[in-house]
Every structure is written in structure tokens, then in C-alpha cells.
Amino acid sequence: MDVDRLRAELDEARRELARAAEPVAVVGTSRDPDRALVEQAREALDHAGATPAQRATTGVYLDSGAGVVARALGLGGPAVTVHDSPDAPRTAVRALRAGDCDLALTTADGGLVVLERLSDARRAGRAVLDTQPSTEDFPGDWRYRVEWQPVPDPDDGALSGTWLVVLPGDDRLDAAPLVAALARAGADVLVVRTRFAEVIAAHPGLAGVVSLAGLDERPHPEHPAVPVGLATTLALLHALVDADRAVPLHLLTRGAVGVAGAPPTAPRQNAVWGMGRVIALEHPDRWGGLVDLPDRLTDDALRRVVTLIADPAEDQAAVRASGVHARRLVRAPVLTAKPWRPRRPVLLTGATGALGPHIARWLAGLGARHLVLTSKRGDAAPGMADLRADLAAAGVTTTATACDLADRAAVAAMLARLRADGVHIGSVVHAAAHIDPAPLTATDLPRLAAALGAKAAGADHLTDLLDGDPDLEAVVLFTSVAGTWGSAEHGAYAAANAYLDARAEAGRAAGLPTTAVAWGVWDARDPHRAATRYPEVLRRQGLPRMRPGPALAALTAALAHREPAVAVAAVDWARFAPVFASTAPRPLLDGVPEARATHPARGGTTLLDLVTGTVSAVAGHAPGLLGPERPFAELGVDSLMAVEIRDRLAAATGTALPVSVVHDHPTPTRLAAFLRGQGKPAPEPDRQADAVAIVGMACRYPGGVRTPEDLWRLVADGVDAVAGFPTDRNWDLDSLTGPTGGAFLDAVADFDAAFFGVDPAEALAMDPQQRLLLELSWEAVERAGIDPRSLRGSRTAVFAGALKPTTAPAPPTTSPRSTCRPASPNSSRRATTRPPRPGASPTPSAWRDPR
């Protein structure tokens, strides 16, 4: 074997990989859309300081006119017209990285920009205006968050048999009221603080276990990274398994989770929740549930806690003064904002792991000029030299340092050395992890400590030692969906990650810039470690791998919006949900419509549950809030939701359903009955004998009337619709004399042109009444429970009338331009929109939207 040739080929492959991910810089812009395209291009190139030699290798990538611009300015690179405008900048970035050009002229944010490889720009000393770290988008359905949804108070629960209550190791909770409440419910209660294994072994007829041990947050004397309560929870599970007791284990905490906008007050206890979710998967016959207690154990709170223990239909719940809140996984909306940019050095932990190199290049693309790369072996870590060489080629300064993140003194010493060298950390990306898959029965304290040391203790030390720095920009904690919904053989890892999620929420509420991202399965592996079987197993179970580019784009979005905690995962719910719920119901997933739709439908009762669950999930309500006879409209189900409900029910039942099925059968009972009839449509009515019915209305009137209900309230309450002049029409109100107000429609300028497929320029020229006609037509159909888009190509008629308004003659001092002319809703010309000249006495009904 020619070792030298093989090494050279590997080096070239590494360089090619680095070029494929090399960050791109914006070095010139033109933001004047009113100028001709060629003049904009000339301005952008001049702004970039492009020399004649560089212009000879400048490529043009526009959605139109690329060839015209290239010829007019004498640009010698490729001239490519990309007809889909969002793809133009992506094409330009790919061309730069492939070496097709040295500069690239393309579109961005309504103007033109000049792009250059970041390393070239820095070598040339050119000003970098912005960076484009990735041209990949992430699917919107990758984003999830946890939501606590109120559920109705269940009936009082009853217990029987012998129940064991395990107290925390310290005296932080007076458990006597809870013990008394369990006894009142019918339980014979045994209370222990230690030696619970002996008690479990001595009571073969044990009915259940209620553990308060998780409230003990003291560090374990032999393994400080492990809270005593978490260690006790693990030991309690081992005791049940060793004694072969298949009884429900209920884990109680206080302040582990944040509900209704309140942050967690005891985030360390959330590690018990992470471990509990894995107990539920590995030991379903020993699972009871997780309950977070309120600050005060009132009689109502105790009754709710006992009921959750007696009938744990919700196995992840929080009891508060306002009632019971159930934990749900829901989709997180995709938001847009200006990308986060690091201004000071960034500390990256786990720099040479499977994700570290991808994160480092992502940070470089965001504009980071100095990266501190940490690992246990520092510069001697496998892959560190190659990573530093790639970053240096991109113009990024790097510092490699060895540090055991579980050792607080070592972390403090590392930060002190950096400060002494003039390196002041502005951001932290904590990606270090210790993943050692094992079932909880094979997990001992050293194994648990190893998982929490790298992940949880490292985050604690870094955050605590940097807290108080007013220039701290971001603390990004990489966590895992193992902590969000659980993963078999990852009990220790899930506990560590669940704690970090709660810590990020508490930190953000306290003013720290913390963000935790719970990741799904990445399409990345550590080349210096043997591959494992888990990614392939997870793929078959419905968790496909995510490519690094889109995953990091999702991270950019989370940081831009300062989200405290979000989950990013690719999930095939049709595969994952049935596997996840194969041994027991998992109400956690009821907030995800695709997961809810996978529940089997057998018999009338289950069909009713399927309907209520699907409707509630789509409408964003807890299933218990929708009674069998409650109309869907009362839950706010609109036409778009109705179509989604139809789609979910069709997928769950395997039945072709009409688009109008939710409208035709507007309660759970009636819809379930229809589904029980195998989805057969009702007979066609005799249309000749049919009366005509009004099924939808929409209106706009002065006085804030935007719906028929508003109009009825205005009339019934005798509301005066005359008000002051509107402030959203660009009128010079200070210069006006005469009347001080009138009857005006509000929000007439709030027209969504893109929604109706209208060009923004055309929307400005349209008569405002034409825009109102479009909006009202859509709303009237939608309020009838019909998706307006479903009417395309149908036998639907449109009849629109136009009235000539009667307006009092304008006073002589009124500008002629402000007088009213006949309404023409079918006109595409612009109505009179200018206000009276200063000093004029206006005729209010003549004023129109000025935009």
C-alpha cells in the first residue's frame, strides 16, 4: 500500500470537505430598489472595492437580467439567471465554494449583494458586512416545544392495599398532609426514609410506591455531580426489580417544571423527570407517573395529587393552585428574525466529538473570529489539528485547551488562563456529552455520575463562573430528545439532558442568555470512534437522521429568537408513535396531530376518543375539554382546521372522507357515528325542494366592527361608532381644523397582499373597497365552515353589488382631492387617498387609506 499517496488523498478529501462548508461573506451591497438593476450592481461592486481583475472573475446570479448585468459591467464570471429567486443566493454560494468565481453578485433582502469566501475577504483586509453560514433551510416540522395544558379535575380517586411512601433524605418537605390524604383515600401507608429495599422485600402484597426522594438536591457524597434524590430514585427502581415487585412507582417533585409562564424553581429535580420517562419505557409494568407539587399543599392540591396517583391517566402532570396541568409535546412555530452573530470569542466544548467540527464551522460562518476549543485532551485530541487547520484557512483564530468539565477547579483555572491571555469569553456552546447506553438495571452510581459530570456539571460550572459578565452573549446547551420524551437504554443520559432543559428555562427567566436545544438524531459520527447500531435502530423506529446543515439552521433560528428551550428532531410519526406507545398510552404526544392520528380506532367508544383527541390536538386544547356533544365551533375550529381534522381522521381510519365532513357532523358524537358507518356520505338532498339558507356572513363597520358578532354587540349596547381620526393613515392630524373625528373603518391598511396572491405594488393601487371585498368574501366563506380554496373549480357563483355612497358636499375650504367618488370595488384603479390640505375642514367619509 502506498501510504504517502493515501495520506495525500485523505488530505485532499479533507480540504474538499472544508471548501464545501466554507463560510461566505457579504462584502458589498446596494439597497436602492428604485434604481435600475445595472446601476444597483455597479454600486454594490464599487462598495465591495472590486478591482478590474476581480471583476473579470465575478459571477452574476440573479432571478432575472443576469446576462444584461454581466455584459453592461464587463463581468467575466458565469452569468446565471435563477428563476426561483430564493435559490439565487444559494446558487451563488455554491459557485463560490466550488471555485467557479472569486466574487458573486446576487440578491438579498430586496437589494443586491456581493459575496466572497470569508477566508479570501479576511486575507484581503476587506470589510465583512455580514456572513452567510449556510444556504440550507430546515423543515418547519422539525421544531417542537413542551406545553403545559390545563385538564379538567378528575373525580376523587380511591386507593387500596399497602402503599410505600419514600421521604427525601433531608427535611425540606412536611409529608404528613400527603400521607394523611393517601390514608383517607383508602391506602394503608408505610413511611420510610431509608432501608426501603428491605421494606419492599418484606411486603409481597405491596400495591404501589410514592417517592418524594427526588426533592433531595444535595450532592451525593461520593459522586457530587449526582443529586442524592436522583441516586435514591435509581436505587428504588433497583429494589423493585430485585424483589420482583411489578407495582406502580410514582415520582413526586416540587418546582422541577415551569407551568403557565413560571420558570422551574428547582431545575435540578428535573433530572428525576428525565430518568422517570425512561423507567416508563423500560419498565411499563412498574410505572405510575410523574407529579410536580405546588409550593403549598392545600386540601385541593392534595386531592388532585391523590387522584393522579390513584388513576394516572396523565403520567406527566403538574399540580398548581389553578388545577392540574398535563405535559404535552406540541409543534413550535417557525419564526424569522435577524440571525444571532457572536461578537466576542466563543468557547466550544466537545470540539472534537461527532458534532464539534460542524458546530465550529457553523460558528465561523456566523462571523466568530476566535474559537476556544475544549476537550479532555486539548491539542492532543484526535482530529483537533485538522479542525484548527480548517478554521485557520477560514481566517478564524483558535485556542485549544484541555479541561475536565466535571472538575469545577479545572474549569475556573481554564477561564483564568484565557483572561490572562486577553481572551474574554462572550458565548458558550456546550456540546460535550458522555453517552454510554445501558438499561437502568445495569446503571450504577459511577455510570450515572459519568453522564451527569460531562453534561450537567460542566454546564453548571461554566454558567456559574461566567454569570455576572454583562457582555455574556449566549450560553447554548446541547441536549437530547432522550430527555424530552425518553429513550430506552439512555436513562442516565436522559436525566442529565432533562436537567439542562430546565436549567436553561430557569436561567433565561433570571436574565441569563441560556438556550437549550434538545436534538434528535444527527447524521454525523465521530470518525475516531467505532460506529454504533443505535442510529439505524432509531431510523427504523421513526427517528431518521438530520443533516448538519439544516440542523444548524434550526439552531440559528432558536438563538435569533432567544428561545429558552426547544426540541429539533426529524420524526416519522407514523412509525415512531405506535412504537413509543406500544406498551402503554403516551398522552405526552397528544399535542402532535400526526402522532394522535396513529391511535387505533376500534368500536364506537374508541372512535369517539379518536375524534375528540384529533379535534383537540388540531385546535390546541386538552382532549378533556371537548365533551361528546360540544360543537367544534366552540373550540375555535375554522375551515383550515376542519380540513386538517378530516385528513387526520382519514389517515387513522383508512376511510376516504369528504372535505365537509367536520362541517356536516359538527359534534364528536355525530362525527364518530358517521365514521362508524365506514365514512359513507349521506344521500344527496332534493335540491329542488331545498330552501336557501344563509350559512356565512362577514362585515366591516365603523366602531371596530369586524364580525357579525361585533355588529350585534354595537347595536345591542348602543355603542357610539364616532371616534377620533385614525392614526395609521399618514395624515397630518396636527394641522387640521374643524371636526375632531368621525366614523371610520379601522385597520383598513392591514391587507395581506401575499395571502391573496396580489403583487404589493398592485395592492397599493387598488381601491381600498376592492381590498375589503376580497377580505370579506374570504371570511364569509370561511365562517360557513368551508375552506375557500376548496371551491376552486366548483359550481360556486359570486354576486357582488356596488353602491354609490351619498356624501354631503365638502366645504369650500376642503381640498378637491379629498372629496369622495363612487365606490368601485371591481376597479383596479386607486381611490382618492390623500387627506385635506393643512387647515382644511375635512369630510370624514371621504378619507381613504393613504398607502
Image (tube, rainbow, N blue to C red):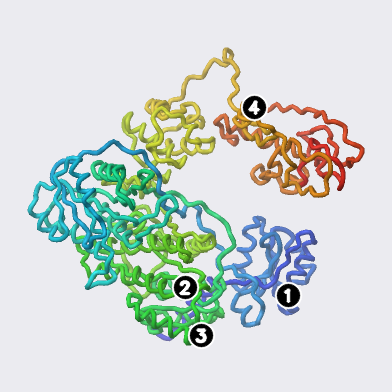
Callout 2 amino acid: Gly
- Residue 167 visible in the displayed image: yes
Secondary structure type for disc 4: helix
Picture coordinates of residue 752, whole percent (x, y): 66, 45
Quadrant, the N terminus:
bottom left
Q: Position of 370 compared to 673: left or right? A: right
The reply to whether dot 3 and dot 4 touch (C-beta < 8 Å) is no
Point out the residue furthest to the right here: 812
Label 4 sits on residue: 715
User: In the drawing, what numbered circle is on residue 55?
Assistant: 1
Secondary structure type for disc 1: helix
Q: CA distance from mark 1 to mark 2?
A: 49 Å
Secondary structure type for disc 2: loop
Q: CA distance from mark 3 to mark 1?
A: 40 Å
Residue 99 in which image quadrant: bottom right
Picture coordinates of residue 32, whole percent (x, y): 76, 62
Label 3 sits on residue: 422
Mark positioned earlier in the residue sequence (3 or 2): 3
Residue 704 in which image quadrant: top right
Considering only vertical position in the picture, is 682 above or below 145?
above
User: In the drawing, what numbered circle is on residue 402?
Assistant: none
Mark positioned earlier in the residue sequence (3 or 4): 3
Label 2 sits on residue: 468
Mark positioned earlier in the residue sequence (1 or 4): 1
Callout 1 amino acid: Arg
Mark positioned earlier in the residue sequence (2 or 4): 2
